[in-house]
Image (cartoon, helix red, strand yellow):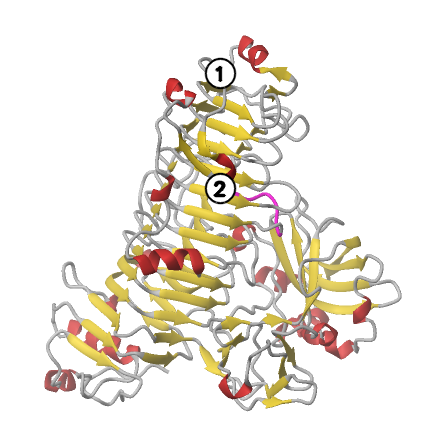
Amino acid sequence: MRTPLLSAALLAACACRAGEWHVSPKGDDANPGTRRQPFATLSRARDAIRVARQAGDASAWTVRVAEGVYPLSAPLVFEPADSGLPGAPVSFIGEGAGTRVIGGRPVTGWQAQPDGTWQAAIPRAADGTPAYFETLYVNGRRATRARHPDRGFLLPQAVGQTLLTNRTTRTEYALASLTARGQDLGLLAGTPQQDWRFAQVVVHHNWDTTRRMILGFDADTGRLHTQGGRWKPWNPWRTNSLYYVENVRAAFDAPGEWLYDGNAGLLRYRPLPGERLSRAEIFAPVPGLQTLVQLNGVPAEGRFVRHLAFRDLAFHYSDSPRRADQLERASLPPEVLGDLNRPGPTQFEPMQAAARTEAAIMADGAHDVTFSACEIAHTGEYGLWFRAGCVSNRIERCLFTDLGAGGIRIGDPGGKGASISSNAVVETLNSFSTAFNTVDNCIITRGGRFHASATAVWVGHSGDNRITHCEIRDHFYTGISVGWVWGYKGSVAQRNTVAFNRISKIGQGALGDMGGVYTLGTSFGTRVCNNVIFDVDSYTYGGWGLYPDEGSEGIVFENNLVHDTKDSSFHQHYGRDNVVRNNILCYSRECQIAISRVEPHRSAIIERNLIYWERGPAFSPTRYKNTDKARVDWVSNLWWCADGPVTFNGRSFAEWQADGRDAGGLVADPQFRDAAARDFRLRPASPAFRLGFIPFDPDQAGVYGDRAWRRRALTD
């Protein structure tokens, strides 16, 4: 329940300095909000400012938040009435490194057991029932939920799906099964049926992940049974899909793991070496609290939350579990829906870039809102999302880490309010438009910890945004994704800038069809420049550095350093008139440049790039047979294979040039300073200069500022 607003009389009688309120964990919401007598909650300060605004006060209000912990049981909501004014913003500023707004509660009552594990009663939710959650944080670390195998994945021997019909609604639902190879699931034999009640199976199939509750396991056949939505026909489960099982008692066998033992009403934890119960800090998220801060403008009515600033605040611990979505629930018969109505395992059907997840900080209808020097960590889903109607907002020097999904989302995947027609660029801004937002100098690491198919930074139906100078590392899917229209239809994702970012440790062999920077659809004026992308490794196919996918059009890729990718440094599925210029593309393991589709128009201009590798041909003779057939203007590129001849689908460079390809190009050692040590600076005598190559400084990519911040980008 919201705390009542301060009365105008109390506001007038307040002894605090004009334009400033104070909040402290030791405060009281009945206090006047001064430094000596502070409020206890941020919501009380918000309400005090709202009253001041209603009374005609036009001051630039500042809420000073003392160091400490501020627990939430519901989202902290800001509405249009809580807005600042032009030149007079409302600011919430933390006054210490430990100023934390949290959606978690300490779990107490732990007891050590004879087998070395710890156990505690499952905390109670607000309604008195056992709380259900799928994440536990121990000493600032996301503990591993008991899983099999402890690391990596299993491959099924067979998969199957049975489509059934709910007679009441005449809609389909599905029962699906995975059959284990050999004794892959042998340790699960003998698991009582009731223990499957809180277990999940997680399946990675190409670019998607699916989470489902487990109906049961047949030890004789090795078959695991699930229920859920119908598989996507273009991306079903296959025998090369990866899977693992979570939250089963038999899998609770490794240090650092925990188990939600719902049938016994207990949490169980197996401590890491050196962890002591007397010093342990263990938090569980508040059930159902996916969002900690909510900016609730009303775009449909033209009312927005404006001119807010949040600085030096940490937002920690949000939830992730969700039952079946509305579409799935409509199809399921009562006997199946009964299980889904009870608190229990997440049912998450696949969606590229985990598009159906929410964020710890959600914004709709937000204008000129800034988050600076904030930390968003230990989330169940995304970190921060400027969704519909969000314009001219900034995220600066923020740390996003230990993320259940990705870091930042900009735009609405549903395209609410946008009119998208074939072969048209949508230019008109309306109240639902999201545009002109900036993400700069941020660290976004350790993502996809619950929803692996999430993107570190996702820009959907949104234009004129800038993603610059970010350190993006340790994610299981794409680093930065821009655009959300497949093919040559219209798009609002125009003129976005992705520049000076350092993107590494992407994919990690967990998902396919992904890359360092991914684009989709018509994007005139979009520039992907001066980024450093390396260590990109997919499962199955993909693992590209620069990846313009279906219908990417009008994009400039320039001055990027891409090295050590599984597949080609640059791969275009299909697109039109993209410019790939003055890049250094090195050490791709499978091939160097790829164009998947031959189209009647010009697909790309590829000019003045330095392309360097160790073994094999420049183009793949199997997967990308059409690379040398596509309509591409190849101009003045330098090619060099350190351990063999340079060939193009069996042809020499001279033969390739005889077909009118790569006029002015060269096969020559570019003379990097030390390519083996990944020092790609050019020596003075490099032949690249003869081609007109313009050197750029890769060290300018990534975060900037004081030494501690730059060091944190490499260590967090």
Task: Look at the image and tell me in which quarter the N terminus lies.
Answer: bottom left
- The residue drawn where x is 61% and y is 51% is 208
Q: Which dot marks residue 2? A: none
Label 2 element class: strand
Residue 511 drawn in magenta: yes
Q: Distance between the residues labelled 2 and 1?
A: 26 Å
Residue, disc 1: 662
Q: Residue 485: x and y, percent?
A: 48, 41
Q: In this view, does 66 lie above or below 311?
A: below
Residue drawn 61% across the image and 27% down it: 643
Residue furthest top in the image: 658
Q: Mark 2 points at which residue?
A: 518
Q: Quadrant of residue 50?
A: bottom left
In the rendered view, would you say 361 is above or below 483? Answer: below
Q: Nearer the viewer, residue 479 or 90?
A: 479
Q: How crowded is mark 2: few (under 14 residues within 10 Å), some or many (20 or more)?
A: many
Amino acid type, callout 1: Asp
What residue lies at 59% left-to-right and 29% top-to-bottom? 596
User: What are the residue bounds of the magenta stretch?
Assistant: 510-516
Q: Is 143 positioned to the left or the right of 408 in the image? A: right
Q: Nearer the viewer, residue 71 or 502?
A: 502
Q: Can residue 530 be seen in this view?
A: yes
